[in-house]
Amino acid sequence: MRAYWLQHNFIEMHSPKLMSAPSESGAELFEVIYFDRKAYLAQSPQFYKQMAMAAGFERVFEIGPVFRADPSFTARHMTEFTGVDMEMSWVESHEDVMGFMERWLQYTYQKVKEVHGDEIKARLGVDITVPEVPFPRVAMRQAQQVLKEKEYVVPPEKKGDIDPGGERVIAQWVKENYNHDFVFLTDWPISVRPFYHMRYADQPEITKSFDLIANGLEITTGAQREHRYDILVKQAQEKGLALEPIQDYLNYFRYGCPPHGGFGFGLSRFLMVLLNLGNIRDTVYLFRGPTRLTP
Ligand code: ATP
């Protein structure tokens, strides 16, 4: 992964994991005591990646720890995991990010196959198959239609979103129709996306965003970001966010910032797909979950 980025003029960054304000919605945030005040553990390097865009670095990536105070007991959630993140400037839309991402992932598969393919086959009985590009793209509107046709009902609290069962139904449909294990689900409604995702000028209810589903499992969220200060502020207010805690972030955009986009990719989710593992615990040396803090 790193090699591909370096070949394409990306700079590796290492951003702080102790922060004074949430990097995302404020949900799933671990608070820590920081001398005489509170700090938070970073839920993603999102704001720092975008700061680098505003500063003119143009292409950055980070591979580092991410913390989520998510009480889920599932086979695909951890409270501490390795996030693989990138951000690139001068994109026209989220399509540029997806186009880059699928080639990066294809390269990663090729390299894993070359270097470790025989051992993975011998130890785990898994054949590494390098995916073809482009990956299919399915807009959320169409995905909802497919779910309806398949008579799959998304739980009501997930309105506008898709739950893991729905992701598997879409993945199966993509396999039958495009014979592909990967699918970009694109164009998500604003209700289920963060304030900094850019919206279509002619469809203000829809964001220029995507998730990558691999073998039925979500492994990435990405988008073109909103880089225009006034619009960003308006979108944050619409989401009911207080501006004061995110003012430092908003300030990055005050004096101009190139149009940019990027993604956040869960390394362990990817390993589950790559190595055909049923549980995220098998992808790490030591697992961290809501009730697991030792050893
Ligand atoms: P989910 O809906 O599965 O909880 P999310 O939408 O909260 O994930 P994002 O905030 O978009 O996830 O994070 C980007 C990526 O990080 C995800 O696509 C996934 O690969 C990974 N990820 C997110 N949360 C976790 C977690 N708790 N444990 C392991 N990986 C995670």
Image (cartoon, rainbow, N blue to C red):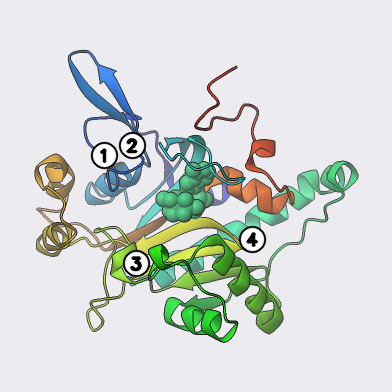
The residue lying at 35 percent from left, 34 percent from top is 15
SS state under label 3: loop
For the residues bearing labels 2 and 1, Cβ distance under 8 angstroms:
yes
Nearer the observer: mark 2 or 1; the answer is 2
What residue would you read off at disc 1? Answer: 22
For the residues bearing labels 4 and 1, Cβ distance under 8 angstroms:
no
Percent coordinates x, y for residue 53 in the rendering: 28, 51
What residue would you read off at disc 2? Answer: 29
| Distance from the alpha carbon under mark 2 to that under mark 4 | 33 Å
Answer yes or no: is residue 9 visible.
Answer: no
Q: Earlier in the sequence, mark 3 or mark 2?
A: 2
| Mark 2, other Cα within 10 Å: few <14 / some 14–19 / many ≥20 | many
Looking at the picture, which amino acid does disc 2 mark?
Answer: Leu
SS state under label 1: loop
The residue lying at 35 percent from left, 60 percent from top is 261
Percent coordinates x, y for residue 78 in the rendering: 53, 38
What residue would you read off at disc 4? Answer: 106
Q: Earlier in the sequence, mark 4 or mark 3?
A: 3
Q: Nearer the viewer, residue 270 or 72?
A: 72
For the residues bearing labels 1 and 3, Cβ distance under 8 angstroms:
no
Looking at the picture, which amino acid does disc 3 mark?
Answer: Val
What residue would you read off at disc 3? Answer: 91
| Distance from the alpha carbon under mark 4 to that under mark 1 | 33 Å
SS state under label 4: helix
Looking at the picture, which amino acid does disc 4 mark?
Answer: Gln
Nearer the observer: mark 3 or 2; the answer is 2
